[in-house]
Image (cartoon, grey):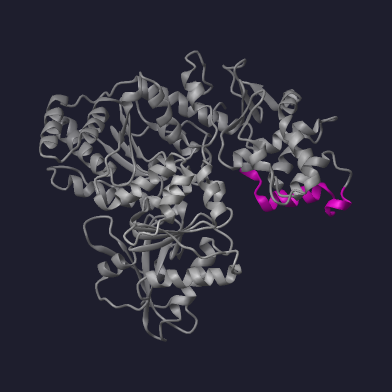
């Protein structure tokens, strides 16, 4: 079956704990020093030093177990491919004098002993020789066998090396990306009427030139992209697009036309629905919009293999998707493959934000490809004008971050102006132990949250009060990670409330509940009486913003899906939200996310941003980028390429 993946890969069947168990079992349940003679002494040292994980090493062992005389450089290549894939890269690129992503940047850690650095450096510099010694049963050269569905775990395309799953998903995406770019919409709308309305809206200053151009391109083509930072009016533009599209249809077309709107997470879908409903509220005979998560729109469930069968085509004639920078390669490939012939697909997003949690950064890749090709650059419109004056200082700072101007960004952050929207907290980790520093940060954050006591009888006011400020961290674990900060803030806050008093805690839903219309990532507040055991009791309830109108949703606490406290959010989870004031923590370890983590956090703040982090971490974060390696640009430009997924069409 051409739709069945012949190789699942360790990422589908081996998690960290299981990989470690498998690794120990293969070694006879003995410690490192007692294990059988090691085939790869340098890699073993690298594993102990934390350069790789058990997953990477177990992967190499599994595929090279029955092959004799294996060059350690070949095992090193497999470990590097495994780690790169886990960190979101679709492939690695090996050229004569350069390997991307760089082994030096990935492998070396502070735990590597001085005497081992040269050994590791030599091994990293000779990965290309390890590739040339790969057993043929592990590798398919897809350029030579373009008409054959690859059944080996590794695929080679020129200088690019993929796991088979990533190769197939990237190919599926590219196939339908090209199809949409070269096809025409089948639903003929009254373009002349739409153009007159666009001109009228411009004349009334309701649309600027960039927004008008974005709408024009989306109405004209089967595929279009609208990009822009916060405050540039992406969803505002999308609302006018839907309105003009609908009003340009005749009555018969309206009877059959289907419009779908979606986003990667429930929170983003809910935000999109509220924004678009405001824009389309005055349209006569317009069907109510119901935003969905992409998983819901595409019919994807956790138990559904991504490629076990061709995805069904969506019936929608216009599909609009927001927050596209958050979409990974698997979901993006399915989305593009699901668009029926003649439909219009419009993507919205900010390509400078953090890439998805899972593999790939296809939205950013697609934007790059379109801008670099004169024939297709018309398909992408960049909204550059910030329409909210209060955001301008933040936008200027974000622009400096994007340009990688570390010294200028630090200068802006370190300025002492009282009126500045930017401030760097001067708490010094070197002068205090981490617990004392954590206490100082928590005490500062406490003053920025509203009182935990219920001081208003109006739910809207409570929600608004808890939407003014948020603590952000790129890390989940550790003393300055999301989990620790949330637990300590909750206990500090609850101590301010007497027994049997009502108190408020911000919460975030962590799983989808379609019956309750609560989705992963949605933020609300939990109201309850303080009891001796702090457990949920009858009468406790939560409030969330409504999906429709200006009211709120009140839900009994015992009916809530899984949730966690939300005093502190991960920067990833904060995407799609905005707060008047943000305190960003950048502890050691944040630098691996690159400047995108700082940009994403900055663009969550509407009025004021405070940043805490050691000087070296800030500098390293600003100097790095979390861009991911893929073959999108090179393969898109290769006009003679025969893609391997024709049967998905």
The residue under the point 63% across, 26% down is 155
Quadrant in the rendering for residue 364: top left
The residue under the point 17% across, 35% down is 244
Q: Quadrant of the C terminus?
A: top left
Nearest the viewer among 375 and 180 is 375
Q: Is residue 114 left or right of residue 620?
A: right
Residue 107, visible in the rendered structure: yes
Is the residue 182 above or below the residue 514 in the image? above
Q: Which residues are magenta?
A: 12-35
Is the residue 349 above or below the residue 649 in the image? below
Count the numbered circles shown: 0
Q: Is residue 225 left or right of residue 187?
A: right
Nearest the viewer among 214 and 15 is 214
Is the residue 454 above or below the residue 91 in the image? below
Verify whether residue 482 appears in magenta: no
Q: In the rendering, at what x and y percent does residue 608 appear?
A: 35, 58
Q: In the rendering, at what x and y percent does residue 54 appear?
A: 71, 47
Instruction: State the residue lying farthest toward the top.
Output: 640
Q: Is residue 542 left or right of residue 281?
A: right
Nearest the viewer among 367 and 537 is 367
């Amino acid at each position: 079956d051409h739709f069945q993946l012949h190789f699942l890969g360790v990422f589908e069947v081996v998690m960290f704990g299981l990989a470690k168990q498998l690794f120990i079992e293969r070694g006879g349940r003995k410690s490192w020093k007692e294990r059988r003679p090691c085939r790869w002494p340098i890699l073993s040292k690298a594993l102990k030093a934390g350069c790789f994980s058990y997953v990477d090493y177990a992967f190499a062992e599994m595929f090279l177990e029955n092959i004799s005389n294996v060059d350690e450089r070949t095992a090193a290549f497999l470990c590097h491919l495994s780690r790169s894939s886990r960190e979101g890269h679709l492939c690695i690129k090996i050229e004569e004098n350069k390997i991307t992503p760089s082994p030096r940047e990935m492998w070396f850690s502070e735990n590597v002993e001085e005497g081992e650095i040269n050994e590791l450096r030599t091994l990293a510099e000779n990965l290309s020789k390890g590739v040339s010694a790969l057993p043929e049963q592990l590798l398919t050269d897809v350029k030579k066998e373009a008409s054959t569905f690859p059944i080996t775990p590794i695929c080679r395309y020129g200088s690019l090396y993929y796991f088979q799953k990533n190769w197939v998903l990237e190919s599926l995406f590219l196939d339908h990306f090209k199809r949409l770019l070269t096809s025409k919409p089948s639903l003929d709308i009254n373009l002349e009427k739409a153009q007159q309305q666009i001109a009228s809206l411009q004349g009334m200053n309701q649309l600027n030139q960039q927004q008008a151009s974005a709408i024009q391109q989306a109405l004209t083509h089967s595929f279009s992209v609208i990009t822009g930072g916060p405050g540039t009016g992406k969803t505002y533009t999308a609302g006018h697009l839907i309105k003009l599209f609908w009003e340009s249809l005749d009555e018969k077309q309206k009877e059959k036309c289907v419009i779908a709107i979606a986003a990667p997470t429930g929170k983003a879908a809910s935000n999109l629905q509220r924004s678009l409903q405001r824009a389309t509220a005055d349209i006569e005979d317009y069907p109510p919009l119901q935003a969905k998560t992409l998983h819901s729109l595409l019919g994807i469930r956790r138990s559904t293999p991504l490629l076990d069968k061709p995805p069904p085509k969506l019936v929608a004639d216009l599909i609009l998707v927001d927050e596209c920078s958050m979409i990974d390669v698997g979901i993006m490939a399915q989305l593009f493959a699901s668009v029926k012939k003649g439909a219009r697909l419009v993507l919205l997003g900010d390509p400078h934000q953090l890439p998805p949690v899972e593999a790939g950064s296809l939205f950013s890749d697609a934007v790059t490809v379109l801008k670099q090709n004169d024939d297709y650059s018309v398909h992408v419109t960049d909204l550059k004008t910030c329409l909210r004056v209060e955001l301008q200082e933040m936008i200027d700072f974000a622009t400096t971050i994007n340009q990688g101007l570390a010294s200028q960004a630090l200068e802006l952050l370190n300025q002492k102006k009282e009126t500045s929207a930017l401030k760097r907290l001067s708490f010094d980790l070197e002068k205090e132990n981490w617990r004392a520093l954590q206490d100082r940060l928590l005490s500062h954050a406490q003053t920025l949250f509203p009182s935990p006591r219920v001081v208003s009888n109006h739910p809207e006011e409570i929600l608004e009060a808890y939407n003014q400020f948020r603590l952000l961290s790129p890390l989940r674990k550790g003393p300055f990670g999301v989990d620790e900060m949330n637990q300590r803030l909750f206990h500090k806050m609850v101590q301010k409330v007497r027994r049997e008093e009502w108190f408020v805690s911000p919460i975030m839903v962590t799983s989808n509940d379609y019956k309750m219309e609560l989705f992963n990532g949605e933020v609300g507040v939990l109201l309850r009486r303080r009891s001796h055991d702090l457990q949920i009791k009858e009468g406790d309830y939560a409030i969330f913003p409504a999906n429709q109108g200006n009211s709120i949703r009140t839900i009994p606490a015992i009916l809530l899906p899984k949730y966690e406290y939300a005093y502190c959010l991960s920067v990833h989870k904060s995407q799609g939200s905005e707060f008047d004031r943000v305190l960003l923590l950048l502890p050691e370890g944040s630098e691996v996310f690159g400047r995108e983590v700082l940009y994403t956090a900055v663009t969550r703040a509407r009025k004021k941003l405070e940043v805490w982090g050691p000087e070296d971490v800030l500098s390293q974060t600003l100097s790095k980028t979390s861009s991911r390696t893929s073959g999108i640009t090179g393969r898109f430009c290769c006009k003679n390429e025969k893609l391997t997924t024709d049967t998905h069409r």
